Image (cartoon, coloured by chain):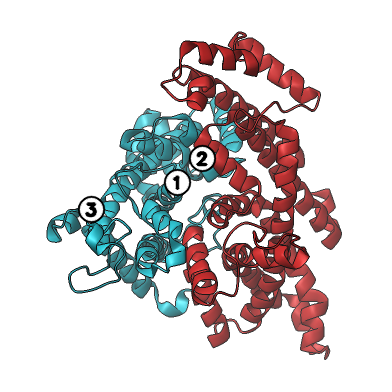
Amino acid sequence: MSEISLQSSAGMPAAPLGRLLGWLGVRATLVTGLAIGLAIIFLGFAGPSLYPVDPYAINPAHALQGPSTSFPLGTDELGRDELALLLSGGFATLVVALPAAILAFLTGLAYGLAAGLGPGWLDRLLMRLLDAILALPSLIILIFFASLVTLNNTSLILLLGFISWPSLARLVRNETLAQRGRDFVLATEQLGASRFYIARVHLLRVMAPILVVNGTFMVGDSIFALSALSFLGLGVQPPQVSWGSLLESGLDIIALDPWWLILPPGLLVFGALIAASLTGQGLLARYGGTR
Amino acid sequence: MVATRLASSSLSILILVTLVFFMAHLTPGGPAYSILGMKATAASVAELNARLGLDVPLWKQYALWWWHLAHGQLGYSYLLSRPVGSLLWQYEINTLVFYTVSIVLSTIISILLGLIQGVYFNRWPARLIGGLQLGFYALPPFFVAAMLVLWFSVGLRILPASGISDLRDANPGIATYAAHLVLPVTTVTLLTVAALSRYFGEAVHEELAKDYVRTARAKGVAFTAILFGHVLRNALRPLVTILGLSFPYIFTGGVIVESVFNYPGLGWLMWRSALSQDYPILIAIVLLIGILTVLGNLLADLVNGLLDPRARYE
């Protein structure tokens, strides 16, 4: 677990699960995390149709108003409805961060399996390359590449997807090596099964809990990375808004005390991260005995 | 261990510098167009290319870059027309002050919280701290920074929100500088403590369960003497390792924090250079972060060697 934890959410090393959460109860942790996560995904995808207000309708007469009955979360400096912006920004965030997490997951899985099952020289080569990628924090690498490419949904998915997989790759590789020496794998190999068959039938099943847990963490990491990039102006590009860019535009006019433009997008990113963290930790405590 | 890390960091820096160098020149029209804009005339592009040395073949520019680096030259910024080396140095000092203060504060607070957590394991003080750690750990740095500005700069009006000096103050002294450091340092410290104290709390708890602690208690040594005389020193080892490893991650948080507070450090410079595609600066900062990463690891190994003689032979 140590390698994967080092790459976790806030870009800081995560502590081992610990018994810190024990008092909350494993089930409560899991249920809370899943509830928050599903609520955010539901809002992101169904929100814009449930609250059909045009997020981009500019209305200077109502500029920068606090929450009221006609504008549940107030308006920004252009008089746009903040709630509608947040829902649209949620969709923009999820539609990039979720496919990016899936891409990173598949890349890491394939890379780890290739290193673990392939010949020794391939393993050494792939692991050396992995060390090189892990030597610098992923957000730093992301900022570099984001400055080099034209930013749109596709390029962002590729960027986030191809930069946040290394920690999973190492975990899968180590686990593969550990499982390869076990009797049932050796027996299958002796019976003439191909490496691909072993990976598909045995390894994936044995590694399922680890994969699910780390896949959950990766969704959180992906949402954080995209929000941070968007906050820095290097993620989702205008006119499309996202949680990160909404928080940034609130910060631009912070002297006017527009708390309703800063608290909600911040809370949404926080909610997404805590949901991924709680779900992952809950799953880990419940299924992931192998740490 | 150290040699492996050194090798992988060097490889990483080499790959990144090369990639960034070539990708920067593969953008349509090359860097000249990102500086002058897409509507630049051919004549002005040619003039700029000649001035920045972008008209020689790409492989020659690449070789020249390493040649200059070997001679301590990092090239010239595209936009600021200044040597990158002296530019970096100016921002580097601000960053060093910012991080030294933040890391020292984070370490002290983490040790205090970790001791409480280890001693009161599974009782309410430790649970309270554990809950706070989990919450703060999931807080995005830009959100924490923005909320602090909202409360302390906009609401209470007691702390400055941006920059390092006051425009109304002709001769900003050390007090002005310190006041501008408070909010950025608080942000980084809160987030670093959330991660560090969890490790230290675990380490203290594990250490307290060991045989030598039981023996010491059995022969009547006071608990505080055991805690501060033995347990603290032994539990510090994992903390130092984590601190060394976190170095680059603290810097990552720093890019965001520096951009929120317009704090003129390396993170801020990196962010501005990325937005304006000023590649000589970006490439130099990759190098510098890579070097800082290696230094952080070496420093952690060194301190661990001082704390525990056994670690010197690992």
Q: Residues within 10 Å of mark 3 (few under 14, many from 20)?
A: some
Q: Residue A58 carries which label?
A: 3
The three-letter amino acid code for the residue at tag 3 is Ile
Where residue A220 sits in the image (x, y, percent)? 40, 54
- Mark 1 and mark 3: span between their CA atoms? 26 Å
Residues tagged 1 and 2 counted as in contact (Cβ below 8 A): yes
Residues tagged 2 and 3 counted as in contact (Cβ below 8 A): no
For the point 69% across and 20% down, the residue is B65
For the point 83% across and 61% down, the residue is B308
Residue position marked by numbered label 2 in the rendering: A143
Badge 1 sits on which subunit? A
For the point 73% across and 65% down, the residue is B104
Give above or below for B46 relative to A130.
above
Q: Residues within 10 Å of mark 1 (few under 14, many from 20)?
A: many
For the point 57% across and 54% down, the residue is B253
The three-letter amino acid code for the residue at tag 1 is Leu
The color chain A is rendered in = cyan
Describe the element under mark 3 as helix, strand or loop: loop
Where residue B23 sits in the image (x, y, percent)? 51, 23
In this image, B217 relative to B285: left or right? right
The three-letter amino acid code for the residue at tag 2 is Ile
Give above or below for B274 relative to B60.
below
Residue position marked by numbered label 1 in the rendering: A229
Observer-nearest of B184 and A269: B184
- Mark 1 and mark 2: span between their CA atoms? 7 Å
Residue A276 visible in rendering: yes
Comes first in the chain, label 1 or label 2:
2
Which chain can be seen in red?
B
Describe the element under mark 2 as helix, strand or loop: helix
Describe the element under mark 1 as helix, strand or loop: helix
